Image (spheres, rainbow, N blue to C red):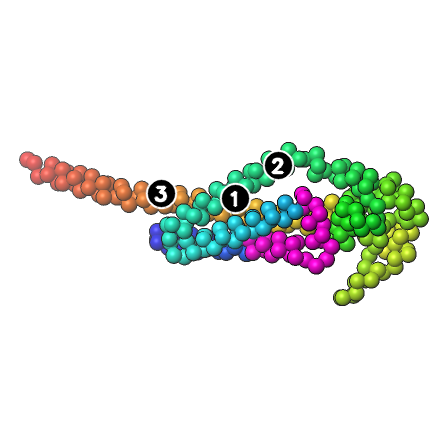
Amino acid sequence: MEGDCLSCIKYLMFVFNFLIFLGGSFLLGVGVWMLVDPTDFREIVAANPLLFTGVYIILAMGGMLFLLGFLGCCGALRENKCLLLFFFMFILVIFLAELATAILAFIFREHLTKEYFTKELRKHYQGYNTSDVLTTTWNAIMKTFDCCGVNSPEDFEESLFHVLNPSQVVPEACCRKNSHLGDVSFSNKDECLSGNMLYRNNKGCYSSVVDYFEMYIYIAGALAIVVLTIERAKEALDRGVACHLSFSPYILNLWRKLYIRVKNYRKLP
């Protein structure tokens, strides 16, 4: 029975570590794509120090999860103590990295709010100036995530863009493209620029970007919780089995002595 339980835990650990392995592979793929993508996104990453740092954080986390999942799978199947030790060390490193990320997010929280991005967009976004880093960044984000503005297209109403382009309600990057595969032309550019809601993207970029990454964040968090829960359960079971094996001879010896004494007592006249 104990062997069956340990075998079950071993294969459960393999399954969850394999999921971590896949998650790490995905993050590595995203990080590499952001660095080598031939579209404007690569230029954004290179020009923006914050995004540049973020890409390498994604690559580092992906590599760590990839290696963590690999060590966990091999350690679980082969029951190798050395690999499992490295596995637990990587869990500790990832926990410390997540803690550091949370601290940095708290310190720079004012720079991660909608109000901050909206203010920067209205103050600096020019629309078509490809030499301006912020303008190029926003154009690429709006095209990549099919969004417009930080909160909505109304963010451009009182902005530098409106001053420079008084005849346009929204920039070209907000216009919807044709849904046909391989067709990157706009559905109706003129109607979009004049403010027609049917031909522009109406969702804000803040929500679009958060929604895009939120699912993967939840999956990573859920995997971490599940793996840690499995590990704690396995540790508890191992301690229970060890305790049982350690005390069984002692308990049996006590029962044998008690039986002998009772037997001898019955023989007394």
Q: Amino acid at mark 1?
A: Ile
For mark 2, does the 10 Å Cα neighbourhood hold few (<14), some (14 to 19), or many (20 or more) residues? few
Q: Does 92 appear above or below 76?
A: above
Instruction: Decide which of 219, 71 is in the foreground and name it.
Output: 71
Please give left or right for residue 155 compared with residue 92 in the image.
Answer: right
Q: Does 83 appear above or below 100?
A: below
Q: Amino acid at mark 3?
A: Arg
Say whether disc 3 or disc 1 marks the residue closer to the N-terminus: 1
**Label 3 to label 1: alpha-carbon separation:** 25 Å
Q: Secondary structure at mark 1?
A: helix
Instruction: Decide which of 133, 41 is in the foreground and name it.
Output: 133
Residue under circle 1? 94
Which dot marks residue 184? none
Residue name at image x 86 percent, y 41 percent: 159
> Of helix, strand and loop, which mostly describes the magenta segment?
helix
Contact between marks 3 and 2 (CB within 8 A): the answer is no
Evaluate whether residue 230 shows in this view.
yes
Check the image and name the residue furthest to the right: 167
Give the image quarter of residue 36.
Answer: bottom right
Q: Secondary structure at mark 2?
A: helix
Residue name at image x 81 percent, y 53 percent: 173
Q: Amino acid at mark 2?
A: Leu
**Label 2 to label 1: alpha-carbon separation:** 15 Å
Q: Position of residue 84 (x, y in %)?
A: 41, 49
Q: Nearer the viewer, mark 3 or mark 1?
A: 1
Which dot marks residue 104? 2
Which dot marks residue 239? 3
Residue name at image x 79 percent, y 65 percent: 183
Q: Which residues make up the magenta segment?
A: 23-51
**Label 3 to label 2: alpha-carbon separation:** 38 Å
